[in-house]
Amino acid sequence: MFKVISFGEALVDLLSNKISNDQANNSNNEDESFTKFPGGAPANVAAAVARLGGDAYFAGMLGDDMFGDFIANCLQQEGVKLDFLSRTTKAKTGLAFVSLDAERERSFEFYRHPSADMLFTASHFPQHCFDGQGVFHFCSNTLTCDRLHDATLAGLKRAQEAQWLCSFDVNLRLNLWANIDHAMPAIWQCFEHTDLVKMSLEELDYVAGGETHANTLDKIMAAGVKLIIITDGGKPLRYFSNQAKGEMSPAQVQMVDATAAGDAFVGGLLFPLAEQMITPADFESFITNTAQLETSIHFASACGAHAVQQRGAITSLPRLEDVI
């Protein structure tokens, strides 16, 4: 089993008890309240891998405060190793207020100006961080400011030099970018250092920038990406590589909260790659074996389907017995 390092933000999701645009809910006089859950996409992915039985690590920074303690304790309880976690007194742990609409899709309001995760620098990756072999995973939120952008590229380059598999969930949150004009070039820069990319259909639209999806996917693979997976909620997902492409339908379930759906999917995809000890050199043959690839994607999809049936992020993630 390879280790999986998930790098980026860990924050507290404050989930509203009300459903936006739900007349039945809005017609009463109850005050809106928020329940805290541990969250942040990379932290969720680390927990997803750990819950499935993987060797999961979280790399990032938390504030030396009650919310930082809450997240660190939750991750440890899930079996996530915190060898690469840093703490700081210079900023507070980030918060995200999460509202759900009638379809249980999310909208976020972030308190991150700056939050502790934004103070992580390249020097916070320990020397031994990339010893051995493994999988390095990240999202675009660590590209939103200069310090984090540089740290992300440093981690990616060290992972590549160590012959680690690199995974990128675009997971675009436009309201986190101080200058949205920087988003597109930063994302495309990361494609050059990544083996596996997962993004939603809306994110593909954004990355395409007006070009056709087909041309955009070709350009992403020309940059060096070996496998692209495009999700679209409960609609069929698609995968693309230089060897093959395909479409798969996710399980149809009753959605309660979509907060961790993508993170559960990514964790479910990285777990079998780590379990089978797939290196970058092995990855193309893994992709070429369509049955093997689709089995892994089906497993990841089952993880995502399980997560949307519960509230919260880490608390909704499946264990192995839930999805086999």
Image (spheres, helix red, strand yellow):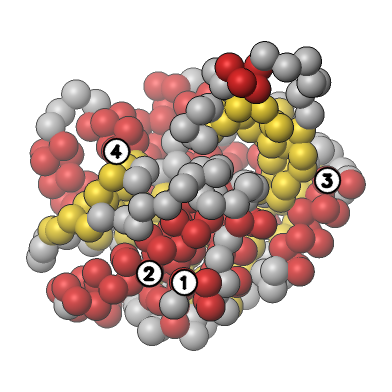
Which secondary structure lies at badge 1? helix
Which tag, 1 or 4, sits closer to the chain's start?
4
- Closer to the N terminus: mark 2 or mark 4? 4
In-image side of 264 versus 17 (left or right): left
Q: Residue shown at 52%/76% (left/top)?
A: 320
Which residue was labeled with disc 2? 299
Q: Nearer the viewer, mark 1 or mark 4?
A: 1
Callout 4 crowding tier (Cα within 10 Å): few <14, some 14–19, many ≥20: some
Please report whichever mark, 3 or 1, sits nearer to the chain's N-terminal start: 3
> Which of marks 3 and 2 precedes in the sequence?
3
Rounded to the nearest angstrom, the CA distance separating label 2 from label 3 is 32 Å
Q: Marks 2 and 3: CB-CB under 8 Å? A: no
Type of the residue with mark 3 = Phe
- The residue sitting at 42% across, 52% down in the picture is 253
Amino acid identity at mark 4: Leu
Q: Mark 3 falls on what kind of element?
A: helix
